[in-house]
Image (cartoon, helix red, strand yellow):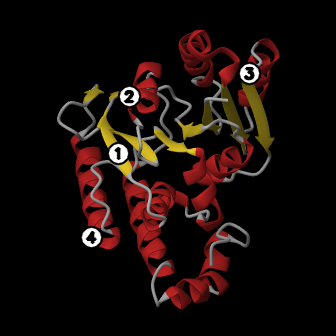
Amino acid sequence: MKVSIIIPAFNEEDRIQPMLDLYLAHFVPLYGDDMECVVIVNGSDDRTAEICRGYAARFPQVRVTEERRAIGKGGAVMLGFREARGELVGFVDADGATPPDAFQALIEGIGSAGAIIASRWLPASSVSPPQPLSRRIASRIFNGMVRILFDLPITDTQCGAKLMKREAVAAILPNLGLTQWAFDVDLLFQLRRAGYGITEIPTTWHDVLGSKVNVPKASAQMTIAILRLRLIHSPFRWVVTLYNATIGRVLHGTGEEPDD
């Protein structure tokens, strides 16, 4: 199989249908049975799973996995990695912000690299409508912290469209953890540690109504997540272990952060 497209979906009943319509209309004529959309529905209490099962009944290229727990984007993508059968394995957000031709550009551009990612911050990228100033500032601060803490010379670690070769996924999957907002950073960091090249290309991105992100809250959570991830990959890992065993149990309960 040529390509697997993983779609993590949490309460996306209003956005998953038009997204699947566009992706299937684009990729099925190109690849036929040589591609698959692996939809990972997790923690949803709406009609997301029902809608996706309807597509799976009509299209052999669609496979649906339902996870009753809310395991987040990272957990859903990791589950999709284990189920994907393609030579190229990627993931994209369920909201349809990345159009099919922008994901196709990843497939065509991966070349000899282990991974290729879309960026909204390269000069040739097209983002519409422009993101609010507060979101742009938060994004650039976060990106600066990632560059300093992880030495990742990447303009956009958080864009929801990424593609990897199967061998690269197999190499890093055992080392990935449920790092919440830091999942994408962890993924890219592990790719570099494993010696795989990462290509970053400009993309087209359309903001879609229905985002569940609270920017101030998300910014704080993202900052904590990458600091925690940096500690995990340092001699001070014990700080995270101690936090998880004490304060973390009170704030998050047990079982949410199995990477300590």
Please, what is the three-letter code of the amino acid marked with disc 1?
Thr
Q: Which mark is residue 21?
A: none
Please name the residue that numbered disc 3 is placed on. 51
Please name the residue that numbered disc 1 is placed on. 199
Q: Which mark is residue 148?
A: 4
- Near mark 3 (Cα within 10 A), the count class, few <14, some 14-19 or many ≥20, is some
Name the foreground residue: 37 vs 12. 37
Q: Residue at x 42, y 68 (%)?
A: 226
Please, what is the three-letter code of the amino acid marked with disc 4?
Ile
Q: Residue at x 52, y 29 (%)?
A: 95
- Measured in 3D between alpha carbons, the distance from the residue under mark 4 to the one under mark 1, in whole angstroms, is 19 Å
Residue 145 lies, in percent from the top left, at 29, 66
Task: Establish if 168 lies above or below 227.
Answer: above
Q: Are marks 2 and 4 in contact (CB under 8 Å)?
A: no
Task: Establish if 105 lies above or below 236.
Answer: above
Question: Which residue is outermost to the left?
Answer: 123
Please name the residue that numbered disc 2 is placed on. 207
- In the picture, measured across the screen, residue 136 lies left or right of residue 84, that is left
Question: Which residue is outermost to the front?
Answer: 112
